[in-house]
Image: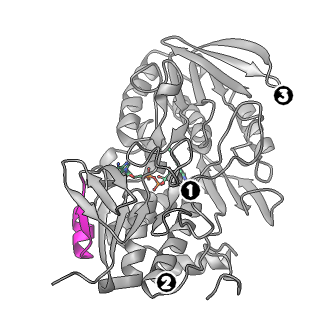
């Protein structure tokens, strides 16, 4: 008998994909066949990677085995990953040779890490990474070696990067842990970033992130170079150009560094890159205000894989960060819009894409809310204090609990966010409702 239920495939089971599967399941229940394809069978809480890299977390504390979670929900799971998608024929080609046809596809494949774009960048070159948990474990081993044999350090992000919060976090966390180990006094630290100023964060600052982060760096004796375009990384130094406003070279710095952690630029993963109408030139998925692809109306996207233009022109390119709450808002909009399509209605939900972020420094931190993301904003708030460290631990425990339970948003989370005036969905307008 022909299967008449809509087949929904979610590609990627990271922060966006896992909760997309849960929300779709909550919305549609047994009215749809939901399948998740991921590279690997564990969920990993990426925001905790900096803690893994200084030994504050073990890998197994931030991972969840997804097999029993999806089994309980009757969600089919393919941990072999996708080799390629074929949107014209509605097929996902899996690694290993199998094909998965779909009626609706949610792409949540996160970033491909573009280490190859700067000579010497990445764990196979001369720099550490905290983007994936195995990188963070590797960075942790190198961190112990650094503490045993103090040497200069560079932390930051390269040209084209979009995720700056973790770079600041890691610099401050390293400082905190090196002070605990009583070796900080022998380790010069420099922060190297393409941002035009400290605290820009790819968002042209939020509240007083410039003042807060500059002050934090001064207090921690971390020097910085902004408008930096790295030429190359070597075993014992970082060679970076510092650009003027007009793009001309102001200075070339050779910064001694034996332990270097730099965030790379992101691009779309190979399985989805270079598909006409689906992706932009960097392989990010094109999505309209309903998270729907303009060419392939049955494809939605959530998370870091979504194409978002930069906020404005900067001497060195910087991208816009896609943070957890923003991703959750994309997920909620997507689940509602697919449910409406299944019901024969038009998509109407729009994620708010509000940027809400907690950047932990180990002994404090900063928090910011940008609503909307692009200035001028209705809410442009940042603050700092010891409470941020505690809040970040709460975020970790809470999110991991959510994934272990296979739940997207227990009611108390909804209540708490609404009490703060932070919504995931924009009010539905008459123009978009059918
Ligand atoms: C180090 C770091 C720290 C961060 N900290 C914070 C924070 O504190 N707060 C915050 O709000 N945001 C933070 N972010 C930003 C963002 O929230 C995270 O990057 C988040 O994990 C992004 O979610 P995602 O679902 O888009 O991608 P990911 O969580 O990376 O998930 C992508 C998934 O797709 C899978 N995949 C990839 N290719 C394929 C394929 N071909 N087939 C099948 N599956 C595939 C991967 O295996 C992965 O499971 C941080 C980012 C980084 C890098």
Q: Secondary structure at mark 3?
A: loop
Q: Which is more foreground, mark 3 or mark 2?
A: 2
Mark 3 C-beta to ligand 1 under 8 Å: no
Question: Is residue 203 among the parts visible in the rendering?
Answer: yes
CA–CA distance in space, label 3 to label 1: 30 Å
Q: Residues within 10 Å of mark 2 (few under 14, many from 20)?
A: some
Q: Secondary structure at mark 2?
A: helix
Quarter of the N terminus within the rendering: bottom left
Earlier sequence position, callout 3 versus callout 1: 3
Is 70 part of what is drawn in magenta?
yes
Mark 1 C-beta to ligand 1 under 8 Å: no
Residue 376: quadrant of the picture: bottom right
Front residue of this view, candidates 7 and 264: 7
Q: Residue furthest left?
A: 1
- Residue 60's spot in the image, x, y percent? 30, 49
Q: Residues within 10 Å of mark 1 (few under 14, many from 20)?
A: many
Q: Which mark is residue 340?
A: 2
Magenta span of residues: 67-79
Earlier sequence position, callout 3 versus callout 2: 3
- Can you identify the residue that label 3 sits on? 245
- Residue 380's spot in the image, x, y percent? 78, 59
Question: Is residue 407 among the parts visible in the rendering?
Answer: no
- Can you identify the residue that label 1 sits on? 286
Front residue of this view, candidates 390 and 378: 378
Q: Is residue 131 above or below residue 376?
A: above
CA–CA distance in space, label 3 to label 2: 48 Å
* Horizontal relation, residue 318 to residue 72: left or right: right
Q: Secondary structure at mark 1?
A: loop
């Amino acid at each position: 008998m022909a299967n008449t239920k809509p087949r929904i495939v979610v590609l990627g089971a990271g922060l966006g994909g896992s909760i997309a599967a849960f929300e779709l399941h909550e919305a549609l229940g047994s009215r749809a066949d939901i399948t998740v394809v991921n590279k690997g069978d564990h969920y990993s809480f990426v925001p905790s990677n900096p803690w893994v890299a200084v030994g504050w977390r073990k890998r197994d504390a931030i991972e969840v085995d997804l097999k029993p979670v999806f089994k309980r929900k009757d969600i089919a799971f393919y941990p072999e990953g996708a080799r390629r998608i074929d949107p014209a024929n509605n097929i996902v080609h899996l690694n290993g040779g199998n094909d998965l046809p779909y009626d609706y596809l949610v792409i949540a494949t996160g970033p491909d890490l573009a280490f190859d774009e700067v000579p010497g960048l990445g764990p196979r070159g001369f720099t550490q990474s905290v983007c994936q948990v195995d990188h963070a474990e590797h960075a942790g081993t190198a961190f112990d070696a650094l503490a045993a044999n103090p040497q200069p350090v560079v932390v930051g992000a390269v040209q084209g990067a979009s995720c700056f919060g973790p770079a600041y976090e890691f610099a401050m966390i390293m400082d905190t842990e090196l002070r605990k180990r009583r070796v900080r006094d022998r380790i010069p630290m420099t922060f190297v970033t393409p941002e035009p100023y400290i605290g820009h964060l790819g968002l042209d600052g939020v509240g007083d992130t410039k003042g807060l982060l500059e002050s934090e760096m001064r207090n921690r004796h971390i020097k910085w170079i902004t408008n930096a375009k790295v030429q190359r990384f070597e075993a014992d130094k970082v060679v970076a150009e510092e650009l003027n406003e007009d793009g001309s070279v102001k200075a070339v710095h050779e910064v001694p560094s034996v332990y270097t952690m730099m965030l790379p630029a992101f691009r779309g993963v190979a399985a989805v890159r270079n598909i006409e109408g689906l992706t932009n030139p960097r392989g990010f998925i094109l999505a309209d205000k309903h998270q729907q692809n303009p060419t392939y109306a049955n494809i939605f996207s959530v998370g870091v894989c979504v194409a978002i233009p930069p906020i404005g022109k900067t001497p060195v390119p910087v991208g816009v960060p896609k943070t957890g709450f923003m991703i959750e808002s994309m997920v909620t909009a997507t689940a509602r819009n697919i449910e409406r399509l299944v019901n024969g209605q038009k998509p109407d939900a729009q994620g708010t894409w509000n940027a809400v972020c907690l950047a932990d420094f180990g002994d404090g931190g900063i928090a910011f809310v940008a609503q909307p993301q692009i200035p001028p904003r209705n809410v442009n708030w940042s603050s700092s204090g010891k409470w941020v460290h505690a809040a970040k631990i709460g975020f970790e425990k809470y999110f991991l609990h959510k994934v272990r339970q296979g739940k997207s948003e227990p009611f108390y989370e909804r209540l708490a966010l609404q009490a703060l005036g932070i919504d995931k969905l924009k009010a539905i307008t008459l123009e978009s409702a059918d």
